[in-house]
């Protein structure tokens, strides 16, 4: 029976990449202890799954969205593939067709649309963002995963759109909390190469107030929130 399950995993469902073999791997972040500091912390890394794509049609729709379909875009975004080739807008459908999505994955998710964002205060230019995404995705390219990416700057924060095929022909990706946290930590590490400071704290450890006092959210009481508010007001009066 075990052999039958292994055959199903390999030939129908695909073999999922184990956490330690995910293209980027970092140890879980340590829990932060409560501290009080009025220093503005580094901006948070932000990576999220926008959509999962089940069909070639859906993938083409997203490819055209990141190229020219987002509201407010004044010009087409440059779209590159995993080989750093510029893909003309009129060739996007051909690029998606080359991924052979229907034969590879008739049921379930074939691609994932990721967004990697940078806070406005980092003041990152379009060209810098493209170089960042190119470097950011190198571990996936090295493992044989196919993808397209583009950068948008017309909204409040510069951000990269990545349309990533979830299978490299041997393994399939999955994006749960652990993998998303590693992607955020990867953003921090790549940012260091560009001379940018970022952080990837766990959601429950992020600061709730402007005082920058870090208290796990699940431990905050009404009294603690009132105390944080009073500390913030006192700090503002002293400035």
Image: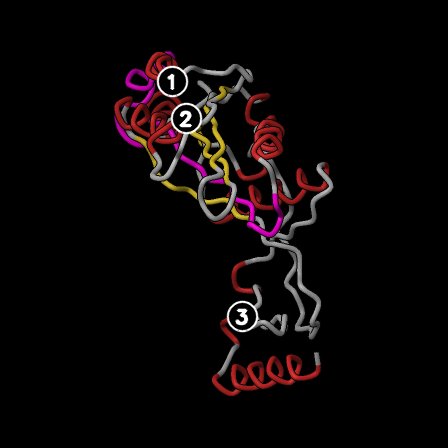
Q: Position of residue 29 (x, y in %)?
A: 63, 54
Which quadrant is home to the C terminus? bottom right
The image shows residue 174 at horizontal and vertical percentages of 44, 37
Q: Earlier in the sequence, mark 2 or mark 3?
A: 2
Q: Are marks 3 and 1 in contact (CB under 8 Å)?
A: no
Q: Image quadrant for the N terminus?
A: top left
115 is within the stretch colored magenta: yes
Question: Where are the magenta residues, as a range?
Answer: 98-123
The structure residue drawn at horizontal position 55% and vertical position 26%, both measured from the top left corner, is 140
**Distance between the alpha carbons at the discs numbered 2 and 3:** 38 Å
Q: Are marks 2 and 1 in contact (CB under 8 Å)?
A: yes
**CA–CA distance in space, label 3 to label 1:** 42 Å
Q: Check disc 1 and report the residue beneath it.
A: 89
Q: Quadrant of residue 19?
A: top right
Determine which residue is flagged by label 2. Answer: 76
Task: Answer yes or no: is residue 171 visible.
Answer: no
Identify the residue under disc 3: 208
């Amino acid at each position: 029976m075990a052999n039958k399950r292994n055959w199903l995993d390999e030939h129908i469902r695909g073999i999922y990449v184990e956490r330690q073999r995910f293209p980027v791997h970092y140890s879980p972040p340590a829990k932060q202890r409560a501290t009080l500091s009025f220093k503005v912390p580094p901006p948070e890394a932000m990576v999220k799954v926008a959509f999962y794509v089940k069909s070639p049609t859906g993938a083409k729709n997203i490819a055209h969205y990141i190229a020219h379909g987002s509201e407010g875009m004044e010009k087409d975004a440059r779209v590159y593939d995993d080989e750093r080739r510029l893909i003309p807008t009129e060739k996007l459908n051909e690029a998606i067709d080359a991924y052979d999505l229907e034969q590879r994955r008739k049921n379930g998710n074939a691609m994932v649309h990721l967004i990697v964002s940078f806070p406005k205060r980092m003041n990152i230019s379009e060209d810098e963002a493209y170089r960042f995404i190119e470097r950011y995705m190198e571990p996936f390219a090295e493992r044989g995963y196919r993808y397209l990416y583009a950068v948008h700057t017309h909204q409040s924060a510069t951000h990269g759109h990545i349309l990533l095929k979830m299978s490299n022909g041997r393994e399939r990706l999955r994006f749960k909390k652990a993998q998303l946290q590693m992607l955020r930590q990867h953003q921090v590490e790549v940012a260091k190469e560009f001379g940018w400071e970022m952080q990837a704290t766990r959601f429950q450890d992020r600061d709730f107030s402007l005082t920058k006092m870090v208290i796990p959210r699940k431990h905050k009481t009404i009294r603690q929130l009132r105390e944080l508010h009073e500390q913030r007001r006192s700090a503002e009066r002293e400035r």
